Amino acid sequence: MNSSVKLGLGIVAALALFALANSFFIVQMTQHAIVLRFGQVVRQPISEPGLYFKVPFIENVVTVDKRILDLDLPVQTVLSTDRQNLDVDAFARYRITQPLRFFQTVRTVPNANTRLASFVNSSMRNIIAGATMSQLIRTERDRLMNRIQEEVNREAGTLGVEIVDLRLTRVDLPQVNQEAVFNRMQTERRQEAADLRATGNQAAVTIRARADREVVGILAEANRRAEEVRGGGDAERNKIFAEAYNRDPDFFSFYRSMQAYEQSIKQGDTRLVLSPNSEFFRYFNDAAGHRARPQPAPEAPRN
C-alpha cells in the first residue's frame, strides 16, 4: 500500500472520528436541549439528562436553563390613585416552563429579561394606579403583589416562562416629596401636640378649680366641726370649773391665782407694775387669801 492510500485512509478515519465525536451531545440536569437542523426544530425539547445522538454537521443543539432565574428591575416612578409619585423597586424570579416556545419567541435569557421587565413595569403601573400609598405600604401590599404576579404570568406564558415570585422590595416617596411630606407631618404633629396641651391645660384648670372648691368646703366643714368640738369642750370645761368652784370656792380661787402667777412671772418681755397690796398678790400677803384691810391714817397732832 503506497503512501497516498495510507494518507487517504488516515484522513477518512480522522473525519469519521470527528463526525462520531459530533454525533453525540450531553444534556445536563439543569438544561433543556433543543435540536435544530438548519435552524429548524426537528424534535421535541429534551429535558431528561443523559447522552443523545444527533446528525453531525447538519444538526446543532441549543440549551435552555432549567433553573430559576432572577429578574432585577430598575426603580420605577409610579403614580398612585391618591396622586402620589412613588419610587417602586421590585424584583422577580422566573423559570422556563416551555423551552420550545421560549426559544421561538425570545431565544436568549437577556431577551426574555427585557420582555419580562416591560410586562412587570406595565402591570405595576396599572395596578398601583388603582391603589393608595397607604395600601401599597401598609394594608394591602401582599394582595397587590399577587395581582401583579398573576397579570405578568398571563403575558409571560406567551414567552414560555412562569413567574414564581415577584416582590416590591421598596415603595417610597421620591426624595423631594419625602422632605415635603416630612415637613407637613411635622407641622401636623406640632399642631396636634399644641391642641392636646391646650385641652390638657383647660382640663387641669377645671380640675384645679373643682379641687379648690372642694378644699374650701372641706376646710369650712372642718372649721365648723372644730368650733363645735371646741365650744363643747369649753362648755364642759366651764361646767367642771363651776362644779369645782361650788364645791370649794376658796380652793378654786387659790388654784386660779396660782395659775395666774405662773403665767405672769414667766421669763419674757412682759412687765407688770402693780402695788404689793393689790388684789392680785393677796395670796402673797395672806395664805388664806384674805384681803388686806386698809390702815387708818394717823391723826394729826393736836395743839
Image (cartoon, rainbow, N blue to C red):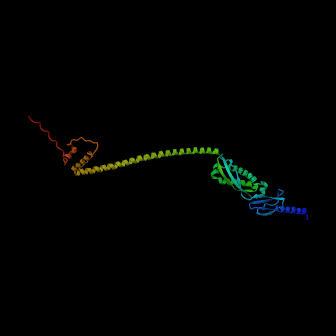
| Count of marks overlaid on the render | 0
Q: Left or right of 123: which side holds 206?
A: left
Name the outermost residue toward the left: 303
Residue furthest out toward the top: 303
Instruction: Name the outermost residue toward the bottom.
Output: 1
Q: Nearer the viewer, residue 52 or 248?
A: 52
At which x and y percent is residue 263? 27, 46
Can you give x and y, in whole percent of width and height, for residue 8 in the image? 89, 62
Left or right: 261 as drawn, with respect to 23: left
Residue 181 image point, x, y percent: 61, 45
Q: Specify whether 286 is left or right of 39.
A: left
Residue 209 locus on image (x, y percent):
45, 45
Is 278 situated above or below 26? above
Placement of the N terminus among the 4 image quadrants: bottom right
Q: Is residue 48 above or below residue 70?
A: below
- The answer to whether one can see residue 179 in this image is yes
Residue 80 visible at all = no
Instruction: Give the camera-side residue of 268 and 25.
Output: 25
Location of the C terminus (image quadrant):
top left
Q: Residue furthest right?
A: 2
